[in-house]
Amino acid sequence: MHRLFVALGLLLGIASVIILARAQYLPGAMRPDQDASRSYLIANATLLDPATEGLRPDGHVLVIDGRIEAVGTGALPARPDGVAMIDANGQVLMPGLIDVHVHIFDETDLAAGLAHGVTTVRNMGGFPFHLPLARQIERGEIYGPRLLTTGPILNEVGGRNGNALHEAVDGADEARASVRRQYAAGFRHLKLYSNLSRESFAAIREEAAALGMTMSGHPVEGTEADPVDFSASLEAGLRTLEHAESIVWYGLDDDMDPDRMRALARQIAASGTVVDPTLVVHENLARIVETAGAHITRPEMAGYNPVIAGYEREGWEYWSAYQHDDRTRMQAFYVAFTGALHQAGVALTVGTDSGVMVSPHGVSTLREMEILVDAGLTPLEAIRAATLNGADVLGLDGQVGCLAVDCAADLILVDGDPTQDLARLHDLAAVMRDGRWLDRDQLDALAEAARHPSSLRTWWRLGQHRLAVR
């Protein structure tokens, strides 16, 4: 009997090693060459600096060790020894894109974003693996966008639309304890969900201020017995107020009156609050309804995480069978409301909720920018939302999303002028991330890697997360 137990223990140990080894496996396309250069002179480029108007032909950018050393036009600067030359062939060189609202469940999500020119992301719902993953990316061990993350999503016990991925609190004491726990774990940014109670909301704000943590999230509604006025979310100092859909719900009770819409836009502008509309995620919901579910199986969904799909399947079935046209009408109103925000002077960012609700990484970022143009922004203003504005709300102004000396060498090379047609962003010739040059073949390899998320890794991480927030 003893030998049997020893044999079973040995088998379980071997099985655990195999499982963990498989969980750690990544496609070779996601592993940078540690000996590859991070210093280049990019010549013959058409420069697109979002901070200025117009394009500058005959441009060059000198990158040394992953940072921009020089930018200019005309005569090339001296090229230091060991710095390779890249001929941009007159194509447009601009900063990489910033998506301030994604959900990363697997490394392949990073590959999908980078393959589409997304070089910085903010994950809006932290798991234990996100902070070490961000460090791996910065050490150059894994290809991916620069990764910032909030802690676990803070919601009230029994809150509407809450789920197992949220960290649920019950009142001020638990709210304070949760903020302190997230800080101790290494998180410096908080995400607030809609249904926090008045006292929990106040406690989170006070504790975050004491610890120097930033906050972003949904407008906080409060409880049915003790609702919170919409203005409280504008006074809370949120880095970004998330979702045009949620703002319309809490700020207008879904009333589509144009006068009330414009008045709310003016109220938000007066508060100085930055809005992250995330229009694409509700557009995808509306498309599910309009196509009776066919939208779920579109080609872009090939790399959608199957574990998350399992969580969402019941909702997909509900909306696929939905017989009304209100989602289409509301989507049009959310776009119009975003236009009103822009006209009122509200700063907008680009966020997508990628990773959930049939919103794939990378391509959704480009689609969000296109919808912003539908809302009334010019293509250049949409590019600024995806670069300068994103950098500002992430506390990275002058570091990313820019084309100037001392900016990170996070760049994209575009075949065509995106200030005339944002669709040109779908035609990337290359991406530079932290000075590492990825040509079209490497981007294609990343896109292929993105089609194969690991269910094993995802389940493992969901389990770790549930233990962390229980």
Image (cartoon, grey):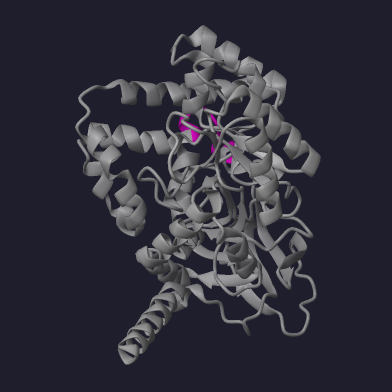
Tell me, yes or no, if residue 346 can be seen here.
no
371 relative to 198 in the view: left or right:
left
- Between 467 and 462, the residue placed more toward the observer is 467
Q: Which residues are magenta?
A: 372-381
Q: Residue furthest bottom?
A: 3
Residue drawn at (65%, 16%) of the image: 267
Q: Position of residue 255 (x, y in %)?
A: 44, 12
Q: Position of residue 240 (x, y in %)?
A: 63, 35
- Between 94 and 139, the residue placed more toward the observer is 139
Name the magenta segment's main secondary structure.
helix
Q: Position of residue 346 (x, y in %)?
A: 64, 26
Q: Residue furthest front?
A: 1
371 relative to 150 in the view: left or right:
left
Instruction: Reply above or below: 96 against 13.
Output: above
Instruction: Reply above or below: 449 against 359.
Output: below
Task: Say if the magenta span includes residue 373.
Answer: yes
Residue drawn at (73%, 46%) of the image: 395
18 relative to 385 in the view: left or right:
left
